Image (tube, rainbow, N blue to C red):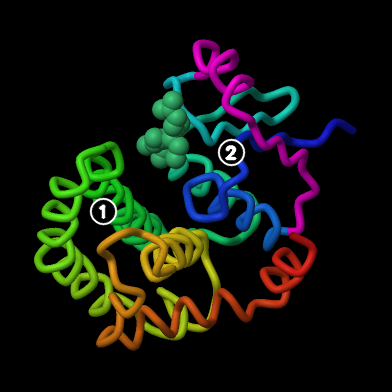
């Protein structure tokens, strides 16, 4: 039986990693394709939106957009709510993560250091606290919806890993201090047995 294929870059801090973690927690064996730049440029025109991650299921097709991929995996493997309204609430939070990535996007492309510093300082002072406060008040704890992990938790986990890595210029590693539920969610995903096993073999 051919396996599904998840195609992304070799980066543990972004959208493809969310999908890899979802498949890992679901216990799905998949082909983990990690593209180098040349391979990506060759593949890009054939992808649905000119972006990765893409998820190919033999006999079904190729799906793009990280939130759609996560939702599909979640629905099929009991990692997304069955109740329509609750599912939409999770999807809203996943979109909130995409909104934050979009807000950071321009500064990721700035080559002028002074301009980048200024843009990031504004984000740290305004966008991030507002973003995190909205998340904080919606987390039941330890996971978004209580005791069970869902794909929304993986989306939040990966963005927290990225932004609190201390490796993003002008974004302090302490950025989410003061948001104990968000940090608790991060710890709960990090300590999930299958997540630990995934990073142990990385
Ligand atoms: N909304 C899309 C965004 C996808 C996206 O921007 N992917 C980036 C990597 S995280 C990409 O494909 N970059 C390479 C390019 O645009 O050529 C999603 O959630 O999947």
Rendered residue at 53%/41% (across/down):
69
> Horizontal and vertical percent for residue 74?
56, 54
Q: Is mark 1 within 8 Å of ligand 1?
A: no
Can you say whether 160 is above or below 72 in the image?
A: below
> Within 8 Å of ligand 1, the CB of disc 2?
yes
The picture places residue 8, in percent across and down from the top left corner, at 59, 37
The answer to whether residue 64 is left or right of residue 98 is: right
Side of 121 relative to 140 (left or right): left
Q: Residue furthest right?
A: 1
Q: Residues within 10 Å of mark 2 (few under 14, many from 20)?
A: some
How far across and how far down the image is residue 202, in percent? 74, 59
Using the rendered view, name the quadrant where residue 72 is placed.
Answer: top right
Residue beneath the point at 53% across and 53% down: 18
Q: Describe the element under mark 1 as helix, strand or loop.
A: helix
Q: Which residue is mark 2?
A: 9
Span shown in magenta = 27-47
- CA distance for labels 1 and 2: 20 Å
Position in image of residue 88 (x %, y %): 34, 54
Would you say the residues marked 1 and 2 are in contact, meaning their CB atoms lie under 8 Å apart?
A: no
> Label 1, on which residue?
100
User: Is residue 10 shown left or right of residue 196?
Assistant: left
Q: Nearer the viewer, residue 13 or 15?
A: 13
């Amino acid at each position: 039986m051919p396996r599904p294929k998840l195609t992304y870059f070799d980066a543990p801090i972004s959208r493809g990693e969310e999908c890899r973690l979802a498949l890992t927690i679901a216990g799905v064996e998949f082909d983990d394709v990690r593209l180098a730049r040349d391979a990506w440029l060759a593949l890009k025109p054939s992808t649905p939106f000119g972006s990765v991650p893409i998820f190919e299921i033999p006999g079904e097709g190729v799906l793009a957009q990280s939130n759609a991929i996560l939702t599909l995996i979640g629905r099929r493997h009991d990692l997304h709510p069955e109740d329509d309204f609750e599912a939409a609430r999770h999807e809203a939070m996943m979109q909130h993560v995409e909104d934050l990535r979009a807000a950071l996007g321009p500064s990721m492309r700035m080559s002028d250091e002074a301009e980048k510093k200024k843009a990031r300082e504004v984000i740290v002072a305004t966008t991030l606290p507002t973003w995190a406060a909205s998340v904080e008040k919606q987390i039941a704890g330890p996971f978004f919806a209580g005791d069970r992990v869902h794909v929304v938790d993986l989306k939040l986990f990966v963005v927290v890993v990225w932004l609190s890595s201390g490796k993003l210029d002008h974004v302090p590693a302490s950025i989410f201090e003061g948001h104990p539920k968000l940090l608790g969610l991060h710890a709960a995903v990090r300590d999930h047995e299958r997540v630990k096993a995934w990073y142990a073999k990385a």
